[in-house]
Every structure is written in structure tokens, then in C-alpha cells.
Amino acid sequence: MIIILDFGSQYTQLIARRVREANVFCEIHPFNYPAEKILASHPSGVILSGGPSSVYEKKAPKPDPKIFDLGVPILGICYGLQVMVTHFGGKVARAPRREYGPAEIIVGTENALFLGMDRTLPVWMSHGDHAEELPEGFFIIAKTANAPFAAIHHAGRNFFAVQFHPEVHHTPNGKEILANFLFQVCGQKPDWTMASFAEEQTRLVRNQVGKEKVILGLSGGVDSSVAAALLHKALGKQLICIFVNNGLLRAGEEERVRKVFGKAQGYTTHIVDSRKRFLKKLKGVTDPERKRKIIGHEFIEVFQEYAKKFKGVKFLAQGTLYPDVIESVSVKGPSAVIKTHHNVGGLPAKMHMSLVEPLRFLFKDEVRALGKELGLPDEILFRQPFPGPGLAVRVLGDITEEKLRMARESDFIVEEEIRAAGLYNKLWQAFTVFLPVNSVGVMGDERTYQNAVALRAVNSVDAMTADWARLPYDVLAKISTRIINEVRGINRVVYDISSKPPATIEWE
């Protein structure tokens, strides 16, 4: 495996994606992850990510210095280069001219990192500091007009470092550079696949759980469905799926779960009707973070109460994904918290069950590939993402059954029309958001003063970034006409043309 140490870069998850796309397994850990734990993982290499800090500042994040004595190849990227330079006695200072954007490196000495590539390569720079003096043993292997130490190498220790970002798509040869590090330098083999991941996770889950029972919160979405399939493969009858109808779900969700994860398919699935309970707890709550906390807490409460019906239930399984972890808590490095996800930051401190999260470090596309490997139908695997808190974060402001009805019905119309237009599988998400806004309208020659919904449609790969979808005007027209005509209480539809960043995909 490859260990990636995160120094807070917004691109750290992209490094992991590029490594996994090369069919090599990797794990991301905080920048100060102990060298002993790294060694215990038997890695073939270590990658030091970029980061927003200046390495010469007093509180700048630094790795365990023992990592440089593990005897494995290391690749430093941007801030990672500066960490490596300062550790060995070189000098890093503020660059007289910052580099943000495209640049061109000139490869000098022949080396494994740039094997098989042209001598001149376009790359993406993003730095205000640079190396001024190299430590003993390091030499230059590439430079730019502004960065004389664009890439460096220590042959004796098999260390490489680059000032640019090979993981972003703006560096066209970035995948090849990373592949050279993985295969030419580290001696890795491209043998990590979803089949191997499924087998490994099956073994790990069995070791963690033993003969105990596991409760899984099954929502019917991609994440929890794949988690259910994987856990069912690993545990069989030890797995108890609980589908909680909290009143915040999409139309037809309960029926869909019964069909795919019912007794006929070998699953033990219990349907719990908690609609009144959740709506009571959410009454009058308008703050989105409070909504998420309340929903997360209530989910755990329901699971714990229901677990008492069974003997030997000591584990709670969740379909938590890596983007959820990144956006919820800064557990991987000194990066900013965006928002709390109900199944990460919303867990109460004194939960009575231990967590089983087999998908915790997978991206959405990897989860779908895993589900395909496990034999789940496309109707489940290629459903568009749905937030854990459900319609609670798509109804802005306080939540009522009437507002949920309008959000649910309008959302159903969007899905129907997007499917009819052949766009469903081309979009990452398309949905409506109920707005706490009333506006004047005219229906049947009469004045109305009713509600508005926003239509949100985006394109994305992993939900870390997203761009608003340029839907055809005729599709927008059909959606708007149907919602206004068919959903009682709505007289206006608006279209959200914000990208992520700076906006998020969901409104709350």
C-alpha cells in the first residue's frame, strides 16, 4: 500500500484518487501519523501532500521525523517538498514571485519520476514559498523559469519531491508522474481492484465483529445499499438491516427497499415507522446544523432502542464515505470543516454500539464499482445521491408535513422529467429545494401568494467539486410547468446556477 500524509491541502483526496485509479491501494492519514504505525502497515512508499502553511512558521505542521528513516521511497508534493528540504537542512523562504496556475517545467537529469516523458512538460503550480537552498544529497531534476527547484531527487534515499501538483487534471502528465513513482520507484503492482477490496473488507469485518450481530441503517441510497451487500456477504444472518422511515424520504423509498433487501433476497430487514417522532423533534428548528445533529442523534436513538429487541447486537454499521468525513471533521489534516454530516459529526459521544464503516475511505464512484462487483442492480447503484438528513436539508427553514409534501412531490417530477429526457445518468444530482419565500402569482385569473422551489442540477465526479448543469430549455420548461400545475401550493420555480465551490451542492 501507499501511505499519504495530509498537511491540509485541498487536493489531498485527489492524490488518493489518482493512486487508486492506478489500481494501487492507499490510505490517507494526518500529517503527524506516527512512523511506527506507518511501518506496521508495510507501505511500499509514502506521499507528503501539499498544504496551506509556510514550513518556516512556528506552528507549521511537521511529520514524525522518523518517517525519513523508514527505508521506503517518499514523494513530497508542494508543501511536502518544503518539509523534506527543511528537514534535511535546506532553506525555504517566501518566493519573490508567487506561482498560481500553469507553468512549464524543463526536465534535466534522466530519472525514474519522468521516465518516458518529454523534456518540457506543462504543470500546475500553487505556491507562495519555494526552496532556496537544497540539502546535501539532493539535486535538481526539473526547473521552471520561476522555480529553480521544481523537482528534486535524493538518489541514496530514493526520495523525490515536486513543487507542482501532479494530482490535478491541469497537469496533463500528472497521472504518468504518479504512476512512475508507484511502479518505477516503489515497485508497486496494479493489483488493487474492487474484487480484492471486497475480499479484504470481508475479512476485516469478520475479524472486527466476530460472532456478534450488526445493525445497519439502510436508507435505500447507494452508500447504505452497497454497505448492506458487503456486510451480507461477510456476515450473512448476523446482519440486521433497519430501514427508518423518518418522514424525510423521497417518494416510494420504503417500497423500493422492501423489493431489493427483502426476505426473498436473504436479508433480514425491519421497517421502523418513526415519522411522527422525527417531525416532533424537528418542529420549529431552522438552523441546518441543528437539523443535522437532531437527525443524527435520533437515528442512533432509534437503532439503540431497536437493538434491544435482539440479543448480541454490539455493532452499528453505516455507509459513511470519504467525502462525508472530509467535510465533517478535520481528522485527516489541518483542513477546514465545511458542514456536519449526520452520520459523522452527528454521533453522540456516549453511543452504546461500536461502529462498522466498511466504505469510510471510498469515493462515490468506487462505491458504485464495488456494488457492481457485489451484484447489486443498476437501479440502486446509479441512483443519484440523497443527503443523509433527507428532505430536512431541502426544506429551508422550519419543517412541516405540508412543506415536506411539496418538496417530495416536486422532487419526484424532476426525476421523472430528467429520466424522460435521457439525462438522469449524465447528471450527478437533480432535485428541488423548498424555499421559505412566498411570491405573487396568477392562476385561473386569480391572484395567488404561494411558495417557491429552486431547481438544482449539477455535474460532478466525487462531490468534492461540482458545476451547475446546463439543462436544455425545453426540459426546464416541462419541469417548471408540471411543478406549478401539479404541486398544490407552489407557484414559482427558479434555477440555481451556483458551482461548488463557492456554494455546496445541497443548500443546507
Image (cartoon, rainbow, N blue to C red):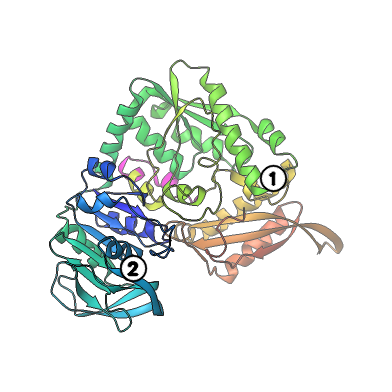
**Residue matched to label 1:** 405
Indicate the amino acid at tag 2: His
Q: Is residue 287 left or right of residue 89?
A: right
Please tell me the numbered disc located at residue 165. 2
Q: Which residue is at the far top? A: 311
Indicate the amino acid at tag 1: Arg
Q: Earlier in the sequence, mark 2 or mark 1?
A: 2
Q: Which residue is at the far bottom? A: 145
Q: Residue at x 57, y 58 (%)?
A: 417
Q: Which residues are magenta?
A: 371-385
- Image x and y of residue 69, in percent: 20, 51
Element type where label 2 sits in the image? loop
- Image x and y of residue 342, in percent: 55, 42
Say whether residue 225 is visible. Answer: yes
Please tell me the numbered disc located at residue 152. none
Q: Residue at x 59, y 71 (%)?
A: 473
How far apart are the alpha carbons under marks 2 and 1? 47 Å
Question: Would you call the spot at circle 1 few (<14 residues within 10 Å), some (14-19), or many (20 or more)?
Answer: some
